[in-house]
Image (cartoon, rainbow, N blue to C red):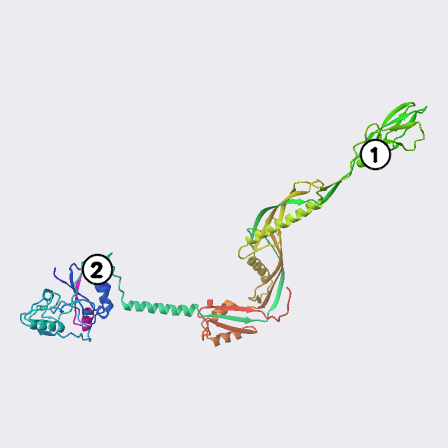
Amino acid sequence: MAPDPIRVAVEDEVPAIIERLRRSSAEEVHLLLPGHSRFGQSRFNFQLLRQYSTRLGKRVSIASDDPVVQRLAEESGFGFVPLPSNGVGPEPAPRGRAVPRAPARATPLAAGAPVSARTAQAARAGARMGGAPVAGVQAAGAARAQAAGAAGAVPPAGSRLGGAGGAVSRPMPQIQIGAPRRLPGRIAVPFQPSRYVLYGGAALVLVAGILAVAFYVPSARVTLVAQAQPLSTQVDVAAQPGKPPIHVRPVSLNKQASLKDVPSTGTKVTPGQYATGQFTYVNTCAFDLNIPNGQRLHAVTGMAFAQIGDLQVGHDRAATATVKATQTGQAGNVGAGQITAIDNNQFPCLTGTNQAPAAGGTEDQKQTAIQSSDLQTAKAQLEQQVRQQVLDELGRGLQRGEKLVGQPVFSNEDFKTTHAVDETFPNFTATLTLTAEGDYYSVDDVDQAFAEKLRAKVPASQQLTTNKVAANYTVTATPGGHLDFNGSANGFVAPRIDLNRLRGQMAGKSAPQAHEMLTRLPVRRSDIEQAPLPLPLMPLTSSRIYVEYVFDQSAAPRSA
């Protein structure tokens, strides 16, 4: 297949040349480069071209009359063919610029010198492109050919000697391309915008940046110090969820806590029991005897007993009465026959004894029992524990810009114990369940509401300074998120100045003009601070000018 000549324009870049090389159907391609072409001025371009030509399986040769292109092509390993002279070739050089041409140097080849096949092929390719056949090789090749001809030797197979008419010239080096390999994908040729369009776009971006910096970077802070007076008023504002002017967010919590094995500190005394028995009277007198209730009897142990109820004992008869020990305790438990003495017995014929033991007497018993103070102490501990849990959880639920009412609203208190007061148990378990409501409110809303109340008290010829209105208040909460804010709003008033208009008038003014404008205002002092550095002009937009109208600390207070 005949070589495919590709004419390269002066402004063509590497991607465009590679795309044309890829579209060529010939395996051998001749690139016709004009003088001072953009492609031919960089060694890197030739290296890229060689890499892609190897991948595409193309044998590329360079044709140019530019010595720089010839040198770079030779250094990069490209073959060189003569520039055609039949009108088909590179574009003419720009007007006013001379394109140097490499002088042709031909050396006669010794008669009968053999010509290599590769040199002959290059000559035929040059003839097909409209030029004369390759007459010979360049000076170095000619010298080698002459030396070889003089010796009568045949040039080696790899030499580039050859020509016609017995002449020998130095050819530019050509490379042998290996087996072609397919590229992994289609080579995309990006759009190459004109450098003038790029320069114009960069200039527009630069101008836009300069304008943006001029408008949005410089800023100025103007401070107006006025002879202001304090102003205060009493404020009472009610708030509830879902209604202005203050946003309220109630939260309900249900908490439970228990105390186990709470020790009982009370003491319960169980009184002792009296011993009881039967005493049998024996009357040997000749008359009947009446023995009254409470008759005292004594046992041999010294324990006294009292007769229960009146008793009549007939003569020569016996009668039994119930007796009870006069003291509690086990001392009253005496055996049979041990109660024998009858106190104040005036009748020797009256005797008696207990035929059965007296029993049932017990001592006083002391037991640990639950008292009322134990329950109250346990309840107080549980309340403290539950309230702390509620406060901790409400504190974790605090959102940005909110404040929590100091004391939550507690309700539905349920206190239970496993045992009641006076029950004889060494310990008990107590459980407390509480329902609590925490109320959050917006601090900014409160400040704004108090500021509005104070602003309504400002006279028409005055205005509040830009200092923040101090809101001093207490807040009380009732169930359902109903809050009451009661306190005072405190601020400062000064002669009225239209600050927005002042900012607009100062925009773009010089620093002396701005200072002169401020001196005409009813203020004690004015200051201008510019950032990031002092400039001869004020910011061009009023949004970058910040005005503060502050009060004089030495002003005397005045109440509304």
Q: Is residue 62 left or right of residue 537?
A: left
For residue 362, which quarter of the picture? top right
Q: Is residue 352 in view from this perspective? A: yes
Quadrant in which the N terminus is drawn: bottom left
Q: Is residue 211 above or below residue 488?
A: below
Pointer 2 local density, CA inside 10 Å: few below 14, some 14–19, many at least 20: some
User: Considering depth in this image, is 188 or 124 the residue closer to the camera?
Assistant: 124
Q: Position of residue 161 (x, y in %)?
A: 10, 69
- Left or right? Give the position of 510 relative to 353: left
Q: How many marks?
A: 2
Tell me the residue at 32%/67% (across/down): 201
Is 291 situated left or right of 54 in this image? right
> In the picture, residue 289 is in which quadrant?
top right
Q: What amino acid is at disc 2?
A: Arg
- Residue identifier under label 2: 55
How far apart are labels 1 and 2 at the CA level?
132 Å
Helix, strand or loop under label 1: strand
Mark 1 or 2, nearer chain start: 2
Indicate yes or no whether the magenta region holds residue 63: yes
Q: Which mark is residue 388?
A: none
Which mark's residue is nearer the viewer, 1 or 2? 1
Point out the stretch of residues depicted in magenta: 54-73
| Pointer 1 residue | 325
Task: Judge by depth and name the residue closer to the eye, 142 or 468.
Answer: 142
Q: Residue 550's spot in the image, x, y percent?
A: 56, 69
Q: Is residue 221 above or below residue 316?
A: below
Residue 3 among magenta residues: no
Residue type (three-letter) at the residue carrying disc 1: Ala
Q: Is residue 460 left or right of residue 105?
A: right
